[in-house]
């Protein structure tokens, strides 16, 4: 397998992984609706930072611990489950909590925002503490590793393809949310989005905690 064939083959797999509905897309959409484009971009950058980290780890064999060590996998899985449950519960709590009405800008209510660094950290944590992402990279990257190529560089190149595709996909999500911002940023719509995202996080966290 040549480098070009490996890159094209992985791209086909990564396209399917990117566009399938999942937690990453839900997090970016929630940020776009509840906080605005800048926070959605920050969330997406956090997610993609985690993807680069997983790609590098898979390339050098570090994430092989997830498959070789049941203890390491269980520890990461439980940490991820706790994080997802905490984040989901926080979103649900905030969506039901009574708050003062925000000051509208151009007729569109603007919710109280969190720091961009916090949005980035949430995206990073969601990705890094998801062992299924690590398992995907450790399963896929070795399949697209040509002989004679630096594993680290190739792993980063493959992760870079996934990141670029994610940037395009997240950009489409953010643009769509921006175009529909008047309807989506209405208090009721924002609360519904937070509740749906919170429930998705709770479901995902529960699934991580109970699965063996």
Image: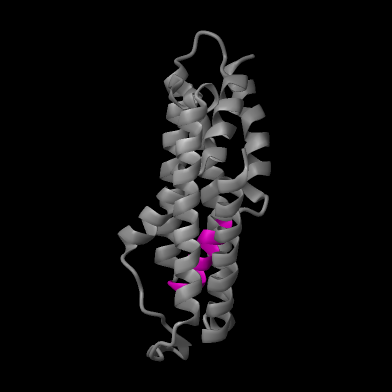
The x and y percentages for residue 72 are 46, 30
Tell me the quarter of the image containing the C terminus.
Answer: top right
Q: Is residue 28 magenta?
A: yes
The range drawn in magenta is 25-35
* Residue name at image x 44 percent, y 68 percent: 90
Tell me the quarter of the image containing the N terminus.
Answer: top right
In the image, residue 144 above or below residue 159 = above
The x and y percentages for residue 89 are 48, 66
Q: Is residue 1 magenta?
A: no
Question: How many numbered marks does the figure carry?
Answer: 0
* Residue name at image x 62 percent, y 20 percent: 143
Q: Is residue 15 visible?
A: yes
* Residue name at image x 51 percent, y 85 percent: 187
Instruction: Tell me which colouring the rendered structure shows.
Output: one colour
In the image, residue 126 above or below residue 158 = below
Image quadrant assignment for residue 49 = top left
* Residue name at image x 62 percent, y 42 percent: 211
Q: Residue furthest top?
A: 148
Nearest to the observer: residue 69 or residue 26: 69
Give the dominant element type of the magenta stretch: helix, strand or loop.
Answer: helix
- Left or right of 57 in this view: 7: right
The x and y percentages for residue 34 are 47, 74
Q: Is residue 156 visible?
A: no
- Left or right of 38 in this view: 22: right
The x and y percentages for residue 55 are 47, 31
């Amino acid at each position: 397998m040549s480098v070009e064939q490996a890159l094209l083959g992985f791209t086909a797999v990564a396209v399917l992984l990117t566009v399938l509905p999942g937690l990453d897309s839900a997090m970016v959409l929630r940020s776009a609706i509840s906080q605005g484009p800048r926070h959605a971009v920050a969330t997406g950058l956090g997610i993609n930072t985690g993807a680069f980290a997983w790609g590098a780890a898979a390339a050098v064999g570090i994430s092989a611990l997830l498959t070789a060590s049941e203890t390491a996998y269980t520890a990461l899985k439980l940490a991820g489950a706790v994080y997802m449950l905490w984040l989901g519960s926080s979103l649900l709590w905030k969506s039901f909590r009574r708050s003062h009405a925000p000051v509208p800008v151009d007729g569109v209510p603007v919710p109280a925002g969190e720091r961009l660094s916090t949005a980035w950290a949430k995206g990073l944590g969601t990705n890094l503490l998801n062992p299924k992402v690590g398992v995907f990279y450790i399963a896929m990257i070795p399949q697209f590793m040509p002989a004679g190529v630096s594993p680290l560089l190739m792993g980063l190149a493959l992760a870079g393809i996934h990141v670029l595709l994610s940037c395009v996909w997240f950009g489409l999500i953010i643009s769509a949310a921006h175009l529909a911002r008047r309807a989506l940023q209405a208090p009721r719509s924002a609360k519904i989005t937070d509740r749906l995202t919170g429930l998705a996080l709770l479901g995902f966290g529960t699934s991580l905690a109970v699965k063996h």
